[in-house]
Amino acid sequence: MMANVDISVIIPSKDNKNKTAEIIRKISESTKDIEIEFIVIDMNSKDNSVLSALNEIKKRNLRGCVIQSGGGTVSSALNTGMYKSDGKYITFVYPSRLYKSDYIQEYYKTVEAQNADFVFSAPKTELVSAEINNISGSELATGLIRSLISMDFCAVMIKREYLLSNHIKFYENCTYGYAEAFVFNALIFEPKIAYASAKLEREYIDIPQKTDDIRNDGCFSKIDAMLKVYETMQLNKKGSNALHNAFEYNKIPSVVMSCVDMLLKDKFPYYAIKNSLKLKEYDKLLKFSRVTPAKLRKKIITWKFFPKFYKP
């Protein structure tokens, strides 16, 4: 029997000292009329962050726990949190990309009022909810790829039952691009979508930043994540034709080219990048069609045929 929990807030945490506790305090103070459970996934912390988070939960008489997930990926930690959650809705709070917690209450009101599966807002957006009323998951995903709609992949709320019934989870081997891939996977199964009018404002709590190595294999991890999403669409026969085209001729090539740009800025030689792409067969992903934006098409052509003239 499921506990009477409105929202499960899942927080991956590693060596954040008392900052995770501060996040819990801020969210609990801004959501007093909502039944929330806090699931802190500790990723092998060496400091007192576990104890301070537990103390905050106990001191405020909140529902919650700290779960040890070892030294795995953030994706693995987030999946652990989902498996342990009891909430009607699930949201994720990333200490490294934090928003002021007022939006959580607004999200909850919106998703409940519209009986939706998926709710989002956008940073500094001028959109009004009427403009994206009745938008489908495929349309929203296509709009994101074409930059017609803005969304922060780290600030969404999704109905737990929707995630479970469609077997949607994070790609555990992906160290980069996992949040974006998760949201795309959630959208391709066509949830009922609600747009919240909440304005997302960054919360700058002083948390030590981990400098993830997103170059080389780390940078290629995002390509793999987007390829897996595209494969999921094909295997499950999900997503509109427009979305399939947007992925094949816009999203995936743009991620490959962003990798090229990153490696060039890191002073990797042209021939070394070319060889890496060929070895992993990523060079075959650099396709374009009439749906490819002109700027991206030009980048692909220059890189493929005139690499010495290519500038990131």
Image (cartoon, rainbow, N blue to C red):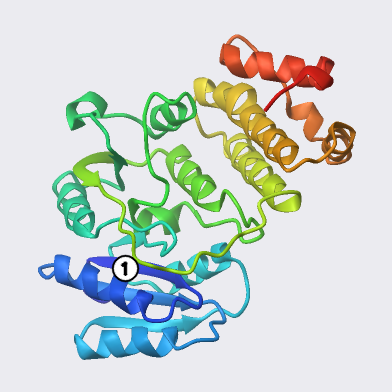
Q: Looking at the image, which residue is at 74% across and 15% down?
A: 301
User: On the rendered image, what quadrant is the C terminus found in?
Assistant: top right
Query: In which quarter of the view is residue 36 placed?
Result: bottom left
- Let me know if residue 189 appears in the view: yes
Q: Looking at the image, which residue is at 68% across and 30% down?
A: 257
Expressed as whole percent of the image width and height from the top left, the position of residue 32 reads 12, 70
Expressed as whole percent of the image width and height from the top left, the position of residue 113 reads 13, 47
Expressed as whole percent of the image width and height from the top left, the position of residue 150 reads 37, 33
Per the image, label 1 sits on a secondary structure element best described as strand
Identify which amino acid the numbered label 1 is placed on.
Ser
Report the side of 251 relative to 284 (left or right): left
Q: Residue furthest top?
A: 290
Q: Please, is residue 69 above or below residue 183 in the view?
A: below
Q: Please, is residue 217 above or below residue 39 in the view?
A: above
Report the side of 129 relative to 293 (left or right): left
Report the side of 207 relative to 196 (left or right): right
Is 14 in front, or is 115? 14
- Let me know if residue 31 appears in the view: no
Q: Looking at the image, which residue is at 83% across and 15% down?
A: 305
